[in-house]
Image (cartoon, rainbow, N blue to C red):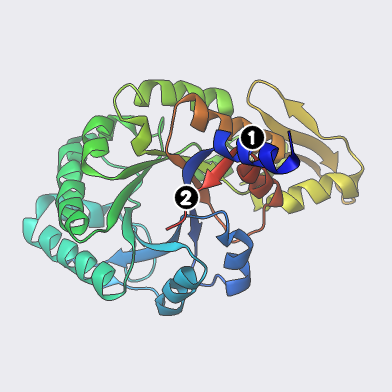
């Protein structure tokens, strides 16, 4: 078999997936360019809103244009941030208790997505109280109904295993185009040392959720950062890039261990100042383990938090295992 024929056969065996990546407004064209070939969408983080349902915008005009120039579809992200950029559950509650505020916010979202030429929209609400579960579904469904008619997609970002009492996965899966399931959570920075995104836990959660939701409506959330804990544990961990995590092990001259159960690299070392530190992060092997879940559960793809830092190992794994859908 010729090398050309072999390459064609290998390409035919690969499955096409959607890849979303989050970015903040200060992303540069160079940062976006590093990821662009391996992205379907880029989600710009994040708009907020007021108690009256008016949007708190970000400076996104150049970002949207840069996305399209790079062949990537931009998505507008909405988080319950107030005018000062602070998260507030009161902002969530007002949508669920005052229909006028909800309608005004939905109108503003639809107008912004349309006028700024966003390809779609992301609900990034985090925690939802159990008593608000039904109204959350209604809010997503109303927004999706209007945006889908205009050809725009709607995604809901969720963190399984943290807030399941307030999340109706089945109904949200019907209301939105995609559910992004983040298999990591920010609160880990205040927890004891451990893997950022353990594969065994992700598999367990996916087994439950895919019994309720069409797997083709799911994007698996993957983290692009590591943590450094100082022992004895007690202070918040330091969040670092994957490259920095790998480089610290080299500088410290310590071996990197790999946990086969959670599928993640980690190591310990002592700083020149005498601090004992533990590092957990991701590498190409651990990313491959997560990407294998996409095939195992027949998911639509992945979503990366964030693309602000380079992660060549992740890009290499994606390129070898899949073909990235381009708009």
In the picture shown, does residue 137 fall above or below 116?
above
Which image quarter: residue 37? bottom right
Q: Nearer the viewer, mark 2 or mark 1?
A: 2
- Answer left or right for 115 relative to 100: right
Nearer to us in this view, 57 or 239? 57
Q: Where does the N terminus fall, quadrant-wise? A: top right
Q: Residue at x 89, y 38 (%)?
A: 254
Query: Is 12 in front, or is 135?
Result: 12
Residue at image coords 70%, 34%: 285
From the viewer's perspective, is residue 323 above or below residue 1?
Answer: below
How crowded pointer 2 is (Cα within 10 Å; few <14, some 14-19, many 20+) is rated as some
Tell me where residue 14 appears, x and y as whole percent.
Answer: 56, 37
Residue 112, percent from left and from top:
26, 71
Q: Residues within 10 Å of mark 1 (few under 14, many from 20)?
A: many
Q: Which circle marks residue 325 in the picture?
A: 2
Q: Is residue 159 above or below residue 205?
A: below
Q: Left of 240 or right of it: where is 197?
A: left
From the image, tell me which residue sits under label 1: 288
């Amino acid at each position: 078999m010729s090398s050309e024929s072999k390459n064609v056969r290998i390409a035919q065996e690969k499955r096409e997936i959607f890849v979303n990546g989050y970015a903040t407004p200060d992303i540069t064209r160079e940062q976006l360019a590093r990821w662009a070939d391996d992205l379907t969408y880029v989600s710009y983080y994040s708009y907020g809103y007021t108690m009256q349902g008016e949007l708190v915008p970000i400076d996104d005009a150049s970002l949207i244009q840069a996305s399209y120039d790079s062949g990537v579809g931009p998505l507008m992200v909405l988080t319950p941030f107030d005018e000062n950029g602070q998260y507030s559950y009161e902002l969530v509650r007002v949508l669920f208790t005052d229909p006028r505020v909800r309608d005004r916010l939905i109108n503003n979202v639809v107008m912004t997505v349309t006028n700024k030429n966003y390809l779609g929209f992301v609900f990034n609400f985090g925690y939802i109280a159990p008593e608000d579960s039904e109204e959350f579904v209604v809010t997503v469904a109303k927004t999706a109904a209007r945006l889908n008619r205009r050809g725009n997609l709607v995604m809901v970002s969720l963190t399984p295993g943290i807030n399941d009492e307030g999340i109706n996965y089945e109904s949200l899966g019907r209301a939105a185009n995609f559910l992004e399931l983040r298999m990591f959570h920010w609160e880990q920075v205040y927890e004891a040392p451990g893997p950022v995104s353990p594969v065994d836990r992700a598999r367990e959660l996916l087994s439950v959720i895919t019994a309720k939701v069409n797997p083709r409506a799911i994007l698996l959330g993957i983290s692009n950062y590591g943590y450094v804990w100082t022992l004895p544990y007690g202070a918040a961990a330091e969040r670092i890039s994957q490259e920095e995590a790998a480089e610290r092990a080299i500088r410290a001259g310590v071996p990197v261990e790999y946990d086969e159960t959670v599928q993640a690299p980690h190591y310990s070392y002592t700083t020149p100042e005498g601090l004992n530190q533990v590092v957990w992060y991701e590498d190409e092997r651990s990313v491959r383990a997560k990407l294998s879940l996409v095939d195992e559960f027949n998911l639509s793809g992945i979503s990366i938090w964030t693309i602000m830092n380079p992660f060549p190992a992740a890009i290499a794994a994606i390129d070898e295992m899949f073909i990235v859908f381009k708009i």
